[in-house]
Amino acid sequence: MRNPAIEIKDLWFAYNGERVLDAVDLLLPAGEFLAVIGPNGGGKSTLLKLLLGLERPGGGFARVLGREPGQAGGHIGYLPQFTQVSASFPISVLGAVLLGLVRPGFDLPGLFRGGGARRAEREAAMTALSRVGLADLAQRRLSDLSGGQRQRALIARAIVSGPELLLLDEPTASIDGRSRQEFMALLARLNRDMTIVMVSHDMSTVDGCVTSIACVNRTLHHHAESRLTPEIFAEAVGADLKTGCPVELLAHGPVPHRVLLSHDDPNCCGGRHAHAPEDRNGGRP
């Protein structure tokens, strides 16, 4: 039987003695596209760092591609959350992708001069750029790309080694709505060849674009759903739909309309918020 992509059992992690993740369990089959959602500070990015071996858990069990975290080497691609590129950084798109193949003795200064890589490495980088639709921009400076193009280039860097697992931390945060849709379509194509785990705050991109959803808020609840339900949404934002107001939730974030219950739904607020002005004033203003 093929090993699961990720296997976690009773995992916990603490910062300065305070647990930010506790009793985390997850069994993720290979080939999944998992969206990790939840409130700020709930532990989403920390979970990725634990999977990468950048942090060590306080206790529990974790395996990534059948290995201990940090031992999977080139089998994992990673796109961190903050990927700003200075306009003065003199590297081409091709050079940036080649950084995903850095090895001992790699001629890093040569990348800034347009060389510094073996022929096979340059071919692998061009293949990765073709997969993300940027082969014609290989010689362009990375800093000259639009936000959406830059994220594609950084995805190419993450997949240039041919990983089995791709970990993404808020990859759509710096791109506009249209580029976001195109970016998610790209990830869906890449998912045919690799497992993807994507941390995201943007529920409008997650809904219907993934194969399952994990809500992380200190612990983790894994839902074998591709669509956001009202229950998953409430769990993700740490809200109670029976006492909270869907209009407020919609007005203060990119929330898909279909995941919110109507005011009059008995499982929501029962219309209390809709009729609040009348209730307070004895009549509508």
Image: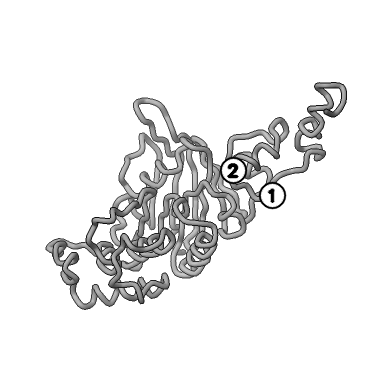
Viewer-proximal residue among 245 and 179: 179
Left or right: residue 228 compared with residue 23: right
**Residue 282 in the image: x percent, y percent?**
87, 22
Task: Write the residue at 19% across / 71% down.
Answer: 114
- Residue 186 seen from this side: yes
Left or right: residue 80 compared with residue 30: left
Q: Residue 32, labelled with which disc?
A: none
- Residue 164 seen from this side: no
Please name the residue that numbered disc 2 is placed on: 253
Q: Secondary structure at mark 1?
A: helix
Please name the residue that numbered disc 1 is placed on: 257
**Residue 51 in the image: x percent, y percent?**
38, 48
Q: Is 275 above or below relative to 227?
A: above
Going by the numbered disc 1, the residue's amino acid type is: His
Residue furthest out toward the front: 285
Task: Write the residue at 60% across / 53% down.
Answer: 224
Going by the numbered disc 2, the residue's amino acid type is: Gly
